[in-house]
Amino acid sequence: MSAGTALIVGASRSLGLGLATAYAQRGWDVIGTVRGDRRTGLHDLAEASDGRVTVESLDMTEPEEIAALRERLAERTLDLLFVNAAITRGNIPVGEVPTEMFAEVMVTNALSPMRVVESFRSLVAPTGTIGVMSSRQGSLGLNTNGGHDVYRASKSALNQLMRSYAARYADATHTLLLICPGHVRTELGGPDAPLTIGQSVPGVVDTIDRHGGEPGLKFLNYQDQPVPW
């Protein structure tokens, strides 16, 4: 893909900040979102970017904030919409998970990304890309060890919702991607994960860019390999 404009939701730190940095370095204009008005690494990136990176506030679990950002960006055309934000609440067997925790993870990791996708899809160029950060933990076929039950379930739900989205808009020309970044050393991945952000992000960006202009939905990892559903 040639350089364009990317909206990266959840770009304050870790993988999201890495993606914003990588796209800016490749000549893209990047709109990154953070929650609230706290200072983040994205603000530092924006200040050093000569206007290439801008910061927007968004808590994607709040529908009114999604609507407000959509209105603020109404005149923009996006070549890439990528939703990165997600949470986990630890490795708790599902029978012990409080209802409120289950709902929080599902709303944050599955429902909210799809609300963003549905709200912003009309701003994405006809040959643009809509991507969402998934995980191999969302794969039913690869779940042979269990653990992290609710996080796994939320990513499986996200994958299913993206498949429903792809079927609903089967005539659209957007590239649709679910991306597994690998097991990365972040707050989600933990300190013992084998990959650094610097090892994962270039592969994620290369994979996204490689499939630009290809309509339809794919579930791929950061090495551009298919992930079993």
Image (cartoon, helix red, strand yellow):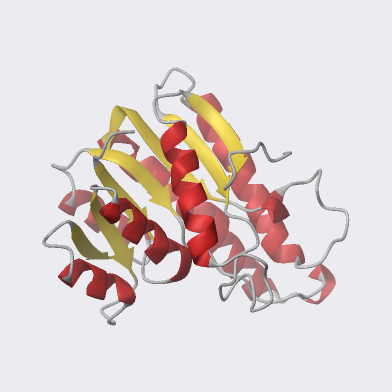
Quarter of the rendering occupied by the N terminus: top left
50 or 218, which lies in front?
Answer: 50
View extreme (right): residue = 144
Drawn side of residue 134 relative to residue 7, left or right: right
Q: Give the vertical position of 39 relative to 164 (above or below).
A: below
Q: Give the vertical position of 143 relative to 171 (above or below).
A: below
Drawn side of residue 108 relative to residue 172, left or right: right
Residue at 65% from the left image edge and 57% from the top image edge: 154
92 or 141, which lies in front?
Answer: 141
Q: Position of residue 56 (x, y in %)?
A: 23, 64
Q: Position of residue 159 (x, y in %)?
A: 62, 43
Residue at 38% from the left image edge and 65% from the top image edge: 17
View extreme (top): residue = 171
Q: Position of residue 74 (x, y in %)?
A: 17, 44
Residue 105's image quarter? bottom right
Drawn side of residue 17 relative to residue 140, left or right: left
Residue at 25% from the left image edge and 79% from the top image edge: 37
Q: Give the vertical position of 229 relative to 92 (above or below).
A: above
Residue at 55% from the left image edge and 59% from the top image edge: 109
Residue 151 visible in the current orientation: yes
Quarter of the rendering occupied by the C terminus: top right
Tally the numbered discs. 0
Residue 114 visible in the current orientation: no
Q: Position of residue 203 (x, y in %)?
A: 51, 48
Drawn side of residue 106 relative to residue 150, left or right: left
Residue 196's image quarter? bottom right
Residue 219's image quarter? top right
